[in-house]
Amino acid sequence: MTATLKEALKAHFGFDGFRSKLQEDVVKSVVRRDKDVFVCMPTGAGKSLCYQLPALLTEGITLVISPLIALIQDQVDRLRSLNIPACSINSKLPAAERRLILADLESSRPKLKLLYITPEMVASPSFQPCLAGLCSRGLLSYLAVDEAHCVSQWGHDFRPDYLKLGELRSKLPGVPCLALTATAPKNVQEDIVQSLRLQQPRSFVTPVFRSNLHYDVIFRDLLPNPFGCGIVYCRTRENCETVAHQLTKLGVSAKPYHAGLKAGDRTRLRLTGWRANVRFVAHWNLAKSLASYYQESGRAGRDGLPSSCRTYYSAKIKSKSAFSFNRKSIADRCRHATISKFFGDQPPNCAELYDEDEGGSSDNEAKQRKKEFSNL
Ligand code: ADP
Ligand code: MG
């Protein structure tokens, strides 16, 4: 089976192999169609492929729920550029195009393989009969719920419309469901399983601990001394503009990126390639929550090389912060442990990470890593 999957991966997407063992395991599990599947992998890990490839290998149509029209458009464009029949029904779609799509879905052999919709569309009276028709004719292969944390009030992005999806599921008997998210602490995971009525799902979860990330918190007075390519998170657009401007004045090439920019400028910035090898993520302002912090800082070091996650703080900010991330203020000393525990995951061995005296001579790798960090 692995050979066939790899061939299909190459043929449809042009990829030489799976991104990770986890991605491969998810795809293998999904194509079996015998269980619901829960996937928690970080942003950029390639979650979309976990349903896109199975969608192409199974007869029928995969229904994908995604929270934002912009995200959907991005995915649909990408799939179409690969000649994969995908489209989206959403509130912005002209009526004529919508009619064409619905006609295809009502035909005996629809051409479409992936249909993306927003959760608010799910309940729309015009779409319901179409969905019921597909289901009764056995033409729905999967229900994929992307950004599944939106279903949880504990999550950082709660979307009430996601709560309708449980009901949707009960109308689609026999259609396996795949729930995907990048960040889900235990309570959010439980909410997802419950709300989407996942039946004893197989779970595939990337371990929280990232051994190549070094977290630190430093005083704002210090001038930034960036190495390699990175991202600086700021709370407001104004902050973002100011910091980018100041960095540029210091001779560091920097550009602002925020929702206030023109779409063209944003795309150009996204395409410049800084996403691939992010060596550092700095928080000029504190993140909204520990969950957001983990997700944002986690964009560093996706290639596995040592990378730095730095939070800048001042006394003023510290007192206002929603969560405490200062080494002195947490009993564990180790931020990796704080994060792992927050997500309900096994914490790493902090002694090996931080303490030369306790590390012993056995763990050369940990010592080497520590040395690499101190050179950053
Ligand atoms: P996520 O949803 O987990 O944030 P995406 O599905 O958007 O991630 O994928 C991130 C990028 O990784 C995309 O550009 C995608 O084409 C690429 N990608 C996914 N799987 C593979 C693979 N097996 N080999 C190479 N690139 C991949
Ligand atoms: Mg995604």
Image (cartoon, grey):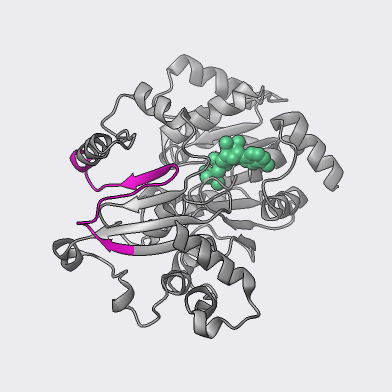
The percent coordinates of residue 360 (x first, y second) are 59, 83
Please determine whether, in this image, residue 294 is positioned above or below residue 119. below
Q: Is residue 199 left or right of residue 349?
A: right
Count the marks: how many? 0
Viewer can see residue 109:
yes
Viewer can see residue 208:
no
Q: Nearer the viewer, residue 136 or 326?
A: 326
The percent coordinates of residue 5 (x first, y second) are 80, 42
Please determine whether, in this image, residue 272 is positioned above or below residue 376. above
Q: Is residue 305 left or right of residue 95?
A: right
Q: Specify the farthest residue to the top.
A: 96
Q: Residue at x 39, y 78 (%)?
A: 333
Q: Residue at x 23, y 41 (%)?
A: 243
Q: Nearer the viewer, residue 118 or 344?
A: 344
Q: Specify the farthest residue to the left.
A: 316
The percent coordinates of residue 96 (x first, y second) are 47, 14
Q: Nearer the viewer, residue 61 or 206?
A: 206
The percent coordinates of residue 94 (x first, y second) are 42, 18
Verify whether residue 233 appears in magenta: yes
Q: Residue at x 55, y 28 (%)?
A: 76
Verify whether residue 87 appears in magenta: no
Q: Is residue 236 left or right of residue 51?
A: left
Boundaries of the magenta span: 217-239
Please determine whether, in this image, residue 323 is positioned above or below residue 299. below
Q: Is residue 95 left or right of residue 56?
A: left
